[in-house]
Amino acid sequence: MARRTKAEAESTRTAILDAAEVLFFQHGVSRTTLEKIAVAANVTRGAIYWHFQNKADLFNAMLERVRLPFQHLLDAVDSDPSADPFTQVRDLMVNGLSLIASSEQHQRVLTIVFHRCEYIDELNPAVHKQDELDEQAVAVMQRAFERAAVAGTLRDGVSPRLAAMSLHMYVGGIISHFLLKPQQCDLSQHTPALIDTFLLGLKK
């Protein structure tokens, strides 16, 4: 009985997250109330508060479902400091963009983050968590470019921090534009060329 209850609780949590994801995508975060999420998930508001403290907690849990694959990609860069850093960074970015191109859920959640999320006080904890992941991504790439500088393959006059920040902003722009106008760029096809073009300017 306990096992079935645990499974039912997980099923309810998943239903709430699925409903929130769809409503946040359709209507924006600030216009989506917990009451609307409860109706869409066919649960009570009490059920939502059983699993989540507030909307920010729910929003962050929604993000966590798509953060994990990106976390694994970041960990792979740091796990082998002897590998060619430019190859590592290229794989990180190509695999990350390819994941977005192939996953409707990632596209939906990232559209919420980029274009449907008003950065209001209510969501500060969740937004702070996303900022932490962004800074971690920059730090991982910076360490890779530091190894490139030591190996003599980073372009003269470009600091590892600048290289990492520039690539992060470049890819962020690609994602934002793709989410708004996917018909203008076949991300699954053009991702390698987009990344290679940028990295070419960072190589000595």
Image (cartoon, helix red, strand yellow):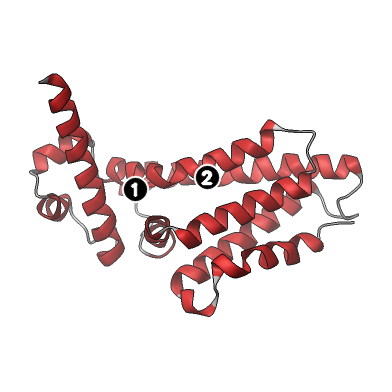
Q: Note whether residue 69 is visible.
A: yes
Note whether residue 136 is visible: no
Residue 70 location (% of width, % of height):
52, 45
10 Å crowding of disc 1: few (<14), some (14-19), many (20+): many
State the residue position of label 2. Answer: 70
Does residue 201 appear left or right of residue 55 in this picture?
A: right
Badge 1 element: helix
Q: Which residue shows up at 9% across the image and 45% down it?
A: 43
Q: For numbered disc 2, what is the local secondary structure?
A: helix
Across and down, in percent, residue 79 comes to 67, 31
The label nearer to you, 2 versus 1, is 2
Viewer-side residue, 110 vs 3: 3
Work out how far the residue at label 2 is from the one at label 1, CA to CA, in angstroms: 22 Å
Which of the two residues, 52 or 12, is positioned nearer the viewer here?
A: 12
Instruction: Please tell me which residue is depicted at 18% across the width and 54% down the height of the picture.
Output: 33
Whole-percent x, y for residue 178 in the image: 50, 70
Q: Which residue is mark 1?
A: 123
